Image (cartoon, helix red, strand yellow):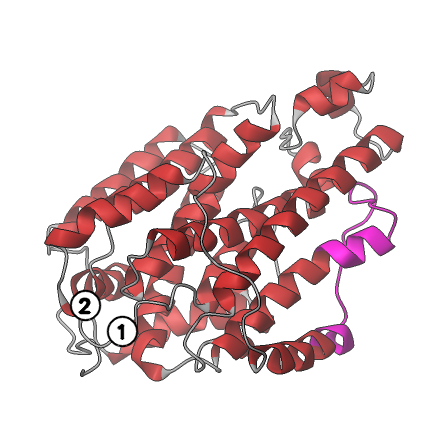
């Protein structure tokens, strides 16, 4: 079958270049890894990354105002209505939506997660943290699945698992930065159960045994999701496996380095060295050639089930160009991780 149409409806070469530059400057390691991807989907993925990055920056730069969410929603209205604003990212993303039938419900979920940031929502339990991660990261995984034409519920579930795992790694890494901005994404019940008042701690955040326990526990939850996602990655088309294994390894290794640092993400920021990143890429290339040994089947988590439903329920009416020539077992793409890497909840740029 022929590949999806690459005909531009709205964006020109300069618009596509602008989206590519956003990932190149915002996420150097994942931009490098993205070069492993086939050309047929790379441009559309850059456009999706660009709009996700724009959305996050709009909330941060504009002071977390609720009006920023409304403006983003109106831009999406125009994109999905076939009349994007005359901005490079909007035009490029409108082309991706038209070519790959990305469900609007997934973008709405992302905006909902950003709105939770604006309102300063509190997360009492691990399930509530998963609810947040499902929106700001699992939704991106489901969007990538949609971009790739994948409609298998099991593989969509694994894409969401991977997205949530990445966000949990983000949270664990950014505890100090978030706290100094007045935000806490660790489950508050974990801290209270250990005798630490979350609000008192936020007034003067310091690293202590309770925070160490919570960070280690959250990274354990992330590792379980990475392992569950591995079976899906191993079933990707061979042309996609190197990039996705590389991205998974690079990002999970942030958690491994944080563990080696004693789980202290309050007094310091975990940084993975270029040499260590290179090792992860070599390991990924080796893993990409190994056969799958576990089943990718299994339901989504309760917190991400609505994302899977959003894609599968839209499938009968969203054939579009995405149904042409993209293998159904391809779910992830490197820009999922680039988008997650850019999800800093402060105005400080993140360059893992």
In the drawing, does residue 78 fall left or right of residue 343?
left
Q: CA distance from mark 2 to mark 1?
A: 7 Å
Q: On screen, 62 above or below 14?
A: above
Query: What is the x, y in percent for residue 178?
Result: 65, 37
In the drawing, does residue 247 fall left or right of residue 296?
right
Q: On screen, 344 above or below 112?
A: below
Q: Quadrant of the C terminus?
A: bottom right
Which of the pair 205/191 is nearer the observer?
A: 191
Residue at image coords 43%, 36%:
113
Q: Dot 2: within a 10 Å radius of its alpha carbon, few (fewer than 14), some, or many (20 or more) residues?
A: many
Residue at image coords 44%, 54%:
297
Q: On screen, 37 above or below 22?
A: below
Which quarter of the figure has residue 16?
bottom left
| Range of residues picked out in magenta | 255-277
Q: Is residue 191 visible?
A: yes
Q: Is residue 352 visible?
A: no
Label 2 element class: helix
Which quarter of the figure has residue 286?
bottom right
The circle drawn on residue 180 is none
Query: What is the x, y in percent for residue 66?
Result: 37, 29
Which quarter of the figure has residue 214?
top right
Q: For mark 2, what is the residue? A: 323
Q: For mark 1, what is the residue? A: 326
Residue 271 in the magenta stretch? The answer is: yes
Residue at image coords 28%, 72%:
15
Query: What is the x, y in percent for residue 64?
Result: 46, 34
Residue at image coords 62%, 77%:
287
Are the residues at dot 2 and dot 1 in contact (C-beta closer than 8 Å)?
yes
Residue 225 in the magenta stretch? The answer is: no
Q: Quadrant of the N terminus?
A: bottom left
In the drawing, does residue 51 fall left or right of residue 3?
right
């Amino acid at each position: 079958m022929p590949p999806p149409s690459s005909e531009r409806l709205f964006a020109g070469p300069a618009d596509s270049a602008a989206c590519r530059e956003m990932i190149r400057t915002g996420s150097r390691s994942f931009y490098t890894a993205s070069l492993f991807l086939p050309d047929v989907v790379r441009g559309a993925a850059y456009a999706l990354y660009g709009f996700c990055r724009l959305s996050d920056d709009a909330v941060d730069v504009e002071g977390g105002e609720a009006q920023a969410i409304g403006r983003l929603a109106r831009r999406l209205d125009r994109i999905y209505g076939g009349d994007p604003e005359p901005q490079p990212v909007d035009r490029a993303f409108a082309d991706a939506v038209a070519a790959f039938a990305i469900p609007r419900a997934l973008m709405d979920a992302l905006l909902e997660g950003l709105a939770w940031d604006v309102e300063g929502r509190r997360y009492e339990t691990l399930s509530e943290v998963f609810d947040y991660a499902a929106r700001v990261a699992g939704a991106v995984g489901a969007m990538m699945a949609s971009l790739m034409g994948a409609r298998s519920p099991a593989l969509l579930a694994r894409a969401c698992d991977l997205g949530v795992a990445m966000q949990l790694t983000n949270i664990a890494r950014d505890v100090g930065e978030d706290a100094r901005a007045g935000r806490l994404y660790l489950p508050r019940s974990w801290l209270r159960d250990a005798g630490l008042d979350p609000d008192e701690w936020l007034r003067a955040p310091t690293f202590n045994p309770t925070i160490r326990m919570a960070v280690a526990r959250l990274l354990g939850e992330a590792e379980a999701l990475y392992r569950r996602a591995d079976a899906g990655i191993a079933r990707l088309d061979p042309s996609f496996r190197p990039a996705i294994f590389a991205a998974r390894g690079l990002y999970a290794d942030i958690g491994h380095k944080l563990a080696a640092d004693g789980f202290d993400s309050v007094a310091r920021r975990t940084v993975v060295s270029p040499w260590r990143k290179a090792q992860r890429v070599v390991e990924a290339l080796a893993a990409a050639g190994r056969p799958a040994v576990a089943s990718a089947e299994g339901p989504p988590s309760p917190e991400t089930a609505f994302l899977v439903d959003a894609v599968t329920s839209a499938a009968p009416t969203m054939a579009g160009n995405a149904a042409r020539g993209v293998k159904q077992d391809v779910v992830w793409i490197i820009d999922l991780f680039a988008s997650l890497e850019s999800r800093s909840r402060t105005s400080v740029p993140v360059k893992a």
